Image: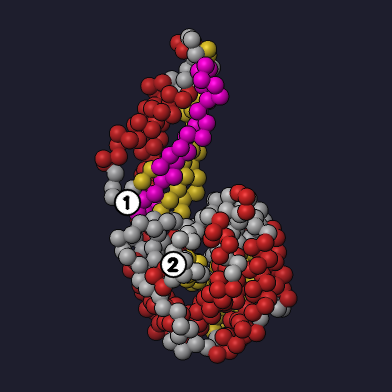
Amino acid sequence: MKINQDVQNYIESIKEELDGLALAIHAHPELGYQEFTAMNLVADLCEKHGLKVQRGYAGMETAMRADAIGQPGGPTVAFLAEYDALAGCGENGTAGHGCGHNLITECSVAAFLAMAQIIRNYKGNVCLIGTPAEESGGGKIDILANGGFDDVNYALMMHPSSGGTKANLVGRGGRAAGHVGVKFYGKAAHSSKPVNGINALNGVISLFNHIDMLRPTFEPQDNINGIIPHGGAASNVIPEYADASFTVRAETMHRIHELTALIERCAKAASELTGARYEMEIGSVSAERYPNRPLNQAFKDAMQAQGIEMVWPDPKMQYGSSDIGNVSIVMPIIHDYLSITDDPSVQSHNYSYTVAACKPQALEVARKGGNGLANVAIKVLEDDVFRSEVDEYFKNQIPDFYKNK
């Protein structure tokens, strides 16, 4: 792929603004649904460049959207920005950008601002959507539910990784994941006379045992991993309250709902056995990811043109989850990975990655990624044959149980 020179030159011309944005977000880490500083920094920069911005987009206080309008009759391409930090990934255990979301923002803002300069030449529109709380709630799921993607046809973003070329992954998928909480309520009593109480902790332990008994029936991609956040206050008191927290992973969101029903059956059995009353709390589900191979290949070509080699992932690997999966069910997406450090010991979700996420190498990768995303958007807008290939691939890859809803 030949890189659009206007895009490349423009991104280079605003390099200091883009790097300043990433560094400012990095210096003020905010957890999910609290990213007011980050959202306003992005919105302010877009407004500075003459673009219309909606703050508090799609009913979410820390979501935003900016638009650049081209000629009528074409699709809308969205660049997605994440900017939430991670608890415990900063210095001395504070919050920090241990997943490099400040770089995701720089990448998508670079692509959007560059496209805004030339969108008048194309049929269609581009937008930038700031999506909160990827790490802790799934802002994209909320935006989808609130209609914030209704007019979008394609969604593009990059995620940072580590470990050099082998971590420049294109077309990487991801399993579905969800959260289930179960609370048990019993009756406190002195531990010398447990017959006078109802042991809520026994309800939790019984729940774990019931789930473990059913593990041999699980499908290969299924996983239910749980902890006991609260199991009682003192060993000489029969606990009147205890709870369990589970992360559920599976090949599809459809299967997550089946496993959630399994957990509820186990909770009901534990409740009937121990006498402790149970309550279920079911969180949002990050769906499995459906990378669009034609879009992936276009991004791979655009990065290769900038001297960055990307590789296809090992299909047997079990990768993590993200709310981009929910978007991938309703439109073609890319969510490809660019390494910000050659050091394989620097892994995401820890302080070492937070340190790496503000280094010059990381900022350069984010800008190059923005250049790559913008060139994919150009190909979508101007090449009708390519766009048809993208749409056809999407139509064929999404399972029928989503289409028939």
- Return the disc, 1 or 2, that comes first in the chain's sequence: 2
Q: Nearer the viewer, residue 150 or 286?
A: 286
- Foreground tag (1 vs 2): 2
Crowding at dot 1, Cα within 10 Å, few <14 / some 14-19 / many 20+, comes out as: few
Which residue does the numbered mark 2 point to in the structure image?
163
Tell me which residue sits at (39%, 63%) in the image.
173
Which residue does the numbered mark 1 point to in the structure image?
221
Q: Position of residue 349 (x, y in %)?
A: 51, 55
Name the side, left or right, on which 286 lies relative to 233.
Answer: left
Q: Is residue 226 above or below residue 359?
A: above
In magenta, the rendered stretch is 225-254
Q: Which colour scheme appears in the figure?
A: secondary structure
* Residue 139 appears in the picture as rendered: no
Residue contact at pointers 1 and 2, CB within 8 angstroms: no
* Residue 271 appears in the picture as rendered: yes
Q: Position of residue 199 (x, y in %)?
A: 47, 20
Q: Amino acid at mark 1?
A: Gln
Quarter-wise, where is residue 151 in the image? bottom right
